[in-house]
Image: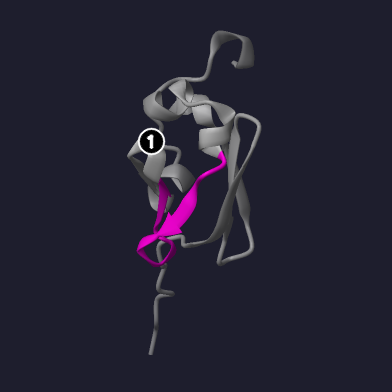
Amino acid sequence: MNTMPVESEPCALRAWAEGRMIYMELTDGRVIGFPADRFEILRKAPDEKLKQVTIEVNGYALRWEALDEDLTVEGVVAGRFQLPLPEQAA
């Protein structure tokens, strides 16, 4: 009997901000980081507000309550960002 491996959506164990970078540790052991400037609301947020990231929906979403911003872990891992990289970073 052939069985196909079941792929599960990525899930975050923890999330944090260092400067303008947002990081999350996933259940599969990976640590993913992305620039806050890739999302409109996060781009405008001060560093102190970025640090207020929480894990929601059993690890499937990142939430910034004070900014009223939510991101899916799956979307970030897949590279679905709202904004392109700034010219100097490209």
Q: Which residues are magenta?
A: 51-64
Q: Is residue 42 left or right of residue 19?
A: left
Which picture quadrant has residue 70? top left
26 vs 80: above or below = below
Q: SS class of the residue under badge 1?
A: helix
Q: x and y percent of residue 78 in the render?
A: 43, 44
Which residue is the extreme one toward the top?
A: 87
Residue at 57 percent of width and 41 percent of height = 51
Does the segment drawn in magenta span residue 86?
A: no
Q: Nearer the viewer, residue 58 or 49?
A: 49
Which picture quadrant has residue 14? bottom right
Q: x and y percent of residue 7 in the render?
A: 42, 67
Amino acid on which the number 1 mark rests in the picture: Leu
Residue at 58 percent of width and 66 percent of height = 28
Q: Nearer the viewer, residue 79 or 36?
A: 36
From the image, which quarter does the C terminus lie in? top right
Residue indicated by mark 1: 67
Residue at 45 percent of width and 20 percent of height = 84
